[in-house]
Image (tube, rainbow, N blue to C red):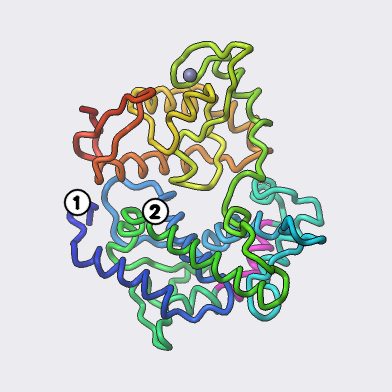
Amino acid sequence: MTVQNLSAELQLQFIGYIQRLVVEGDFSATYKFALLNALADICIETPQNGFSSKLEIPFNRIIEKMIQLYWDQASPFNTSNSETPNILYQNSASQVKIITTINKLKANGTHSFSLFLRAPVRIETIKSLLDSIKTGPIERLQTLSGQCDAFLYPIQFKSSASQSYSIVLNEGIADCFRKFYDLVIHIARNAWTKKVVSINKKKGILNNNPSVEAFLFSNDRMNLSSILPILTDIQSNKCFYCQKTISSSDESNVDHFIPFSRYSNDTAHNFVMAHARCNNSKSDYLAAFVHRDRWLQQNLDTYRRVIDEELKLHVHSDPDLTLAISNWAYSQASDINAKLWIAKNEYQTIKVNPYLDMVAE
Ligand SMILES: [Zn+2]
């Protein structure tokens, strides 16, 4: 099944089902929202060639992705009106295991998610969370109004000889996640935020309505300035977009090539350096093909290894994943006839065919 012939009926069922999940699901913890977000992320991170049937996702990959989503949320939340920062509860009873696990890792010197991915404790950490994630969100996500409706994946899990389990998404579901990624993420994170606010209000941790959503889902904890010198070097001090030299009076920014608003996980190969004015003008647009081709050349070919080696200490580095995200973003832009940004007040549209060579009009 390709996106082109994904049936209209399935698409409607999918949207309806996601809405029902949020309304009719039983959520005492935020795990299920994290699982929904994780499934959507994994679907767009998985390289595809326009044909997908039933996507198989190992539990290990889901757990790793959930650890990534919770990583920064496990830090203390500093409200302007409270004296002591608190770690926000993600469960109405005791704290969820994933948060306590992350904080143990941090206390033992694993300070970032990118470090965790390369740490020896990675395998045993994922194993230690397996039971609670399996019997929790994976088995219960699809319980709506008390009844199981296994629309996304069967509750019979595939296991291989190595005893690792996976879920297998039903036919067309991965395509729906790709097609409606922004919508699913919006729904999941909105419900997740509301849940965190409600749990922590009851526990007396949150009083008013501080900016919980920004804390849970923004990237401003990451200091992009540490990346700037490396990109300046790679780009010979030229703005990635207008190709002009950044003079001493210019302000320069680290830009997410695939906009952060579209895919809010930082990956090393997604960064370029640009004038602040070029970056601001590009805003949440995807860049035009001329920029994409230059980006592919610079970040995924010429400097692929340099970026990996220099940035992996700061941020998750996986060039193949970054490429899959870019292919997904451009094919989705094509589906909805989105405009691509060329320069200030200059845009282009995509003609057709998301999975073969895309051409600009
Ligand atoms: Zn510029």
61 or 296: nearer the viewer: 296
41 or 30: nearer the viewer: 30
- CA distance separating discs 1 and 2: 18 Å
Marks 1 and 2, the one that precedes in the sequence: 1
Q: Residue 237: x and y, percent?
A: 58, 14
The residue carrying mark 2 is 182
Residue at 46%, 45% (x, y): give it.
261
Does 125 lie within the magenta span? yes
The stretch in magenta equals 122-133
- Across the whole image, how many numbered discs are drawn on residues? 2
Q: Classify mark 2: helix, strand or loop.
A: helix
User: Can residue 250 be seen in this snapshot?
Assistant: yes
Residue at 41%, 43% (x, y): give it.
324
Q: Classify mark 1: helix, strand or loop.
A: loop
The residue carrying mark 1 is 4
Residue at 50%, 37% (x, y): give it.
319
